[in-house]
Image (tube, coloured by chain):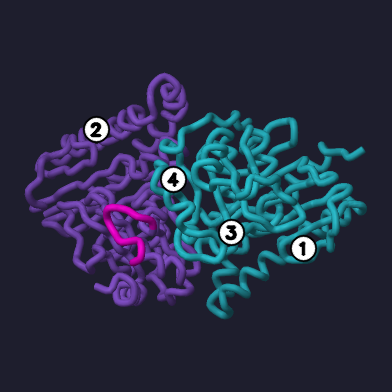
Chain colours: A purple, B cyan
């Protein structure tokens, strides 16, 4: 039987170690930045962090599988057994431009079901975590169940690009929602945006195309506080494939689905 | 002659005191929230913070004038002499919904010219300040002059509402900019967005309607690191009146003005 308590202790220690290395690297990175281009730089740091996790997982859990954004994990055809779904730095653009507002995101799944989820906002030192059936937490303080909110009182996360011409969605679909809500925000990290949903700081978040490592941890967090996690058609997410994402408080999810997405 | 060094020391002490009171109040506020409506609540905290500053300023500087968002200051017809321009809580919606991502913003002007500017991100304990002619700082670390960036490599702050139908601007004007830039963000606090520009974390920020207390401090910060602060027509801001706002790195400001705003 999988020892989830031990896995939890290990993940936390590894996340803190990786976060510390990322913070320490800022000075070096800023130097590198002037010699190279910013995109190369990020890839290096993303890769180093993913390698750190993979080495530790492989050493400790030889029978676990790994899916990682940077491609050092396994080629997966299914999620049977225990699978780690890793995003070493979610919010890469923020990492390069801001040296903040990015997160380490780790979901541990068993037979396709998310069991442990971790989102670590490295610079603000905030660790959001959830254990399926045991609640969601920020820095070990339990997050309460989400309160309902009306559309007109809600604050939603939505990037401005989705209400201008783009390849993924007709801008006419979400524009009326932007006009109706109390406010819109965009932070540039799906993991942080999902952590904000779990913490009740945002009421809904919509994105047109995300990968499993972007949402694997956030899904567990949000479901533990009663939020709804689907794609834009209202379907369950497939943690093996890319998809759109629509997370919200339950009644708000239903209202936006019916009145705006019209699915 | 105005003793700016003494004013600087006083403002810092007052901001820290106010920030501490705001942080301490979160528990109380969360209790109040369940008894009252969220908008009343904010007004109370905004007002209490503005009153704290006004009392201190009036006691210490009897001949200074005050313009405050909550209306406890003076009715001003000009900015002759020394004027304090205060926003006790910039990002009120964030304050209510998130208990973070809001700031105390204070600009001290002399004969219409901004001399001292302070933006305090209360929850993250980050104080951005500038003294005209003496540089801009974050937590007393000097911010470097802004680097130039191409439109396609830039990250800009722009709320999604400005690219959907709204009363202020044709959404067709800024949509091509959203499509061209590397990324768009929206944080919901003009003061924090301006501090991010000064710190080089965002390259441009556009907003359709702000009040003097929203931009009074940020203008000083941004100009100290070489950024350009105007309204959407490229005119100098009037610290006595509401206006649109367009801040950016110098060449980027010119390019966006010519190619997108077409003014």
Q: CA distance from mark 1 to mark 2?
A: 53 Å
Q: Chain of mark 2?
A: A
B92 up-or-down from B78: above or below: below
> Do tag 1 and tag 3 residues touch (Cβ < 8 Å)?
no
Report the residue at 67% width, 44% height from top.
B219
Report the residue at 28% width, 43% height from top.
A87
Q: CA distance from mark 1 to mark 3?
A: 18 Å
Mark 1 neighbour density, 10 Å: few (under 14) some (14–19) many (20 or more): some
Q: Nearer the viewer, residue B2 or B210?
A: B210
1 or 3: tag closer to the N-terminus: 1
Q: Based on the displayed image, in which of its 4 quarters is residue A14 positioned?
A: top left
- Image disc number at residue B91: 3
Mark 2 highlights which residue? A51
How far from the left and from the top, in percent, is residue A138? 41, 56
How far from the left and from the top, in percent, is residue B31? 56, 73
Mark 4 highlights which residue? A101
């Amino acid at each position: 039987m999988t020892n989830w308590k031990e896995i939890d202790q290990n993940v936390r220690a590894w996340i803190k170690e990786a976060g510390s290395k990322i913070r320490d690297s800022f000075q070096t990175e800023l130097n590198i930045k002037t010699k190279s281009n910013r995109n190369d730089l990020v890839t290096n740091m993303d890769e180093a962090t993913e390698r750190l996790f993979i080495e530790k997982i492989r050493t400790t859990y030889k029978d676990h599988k790994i899916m990682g954004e940077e491609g050092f994990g396994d080629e997966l055809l299914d999620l049977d057994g225990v699978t780690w779904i890793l995003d070493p730095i979610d919010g890469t653009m923020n990492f390069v431009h801001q040296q903040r507002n990015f997160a380490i995101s780790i979901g541990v799944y068993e037979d396709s079901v998310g069991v442990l989820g971790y989102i670590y906002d490295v610079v603000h030192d905030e660790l959001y975590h959830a254990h399926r059936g045991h609640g969601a937490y920020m820095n070990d303080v339990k997050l309460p169940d989400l309160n309902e909110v009306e559309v007109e009182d809600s604050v939603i996360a939505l990037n401005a690009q989705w209400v201008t011409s783009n390849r993924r969605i007709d801008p006419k679909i979400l524009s009326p929602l932007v006009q109706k809500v109390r406010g819109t925000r965009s932070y540039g990290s799906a993991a942080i945006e999902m952590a904000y949903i779990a913490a009740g700081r945002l009421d809904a978040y919509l994105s047109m195309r995300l990968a499993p490592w972007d949402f694997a941890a956030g899904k567990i967090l949000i479901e533990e506080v009663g939020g709804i996690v689907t794609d834009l058609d209202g379907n369950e997410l497939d943690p093996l494939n890319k998809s759109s994402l629509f997370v919200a408080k339950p009644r708000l999810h239903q209202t936006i689905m019916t009145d705006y997405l019209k699915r």
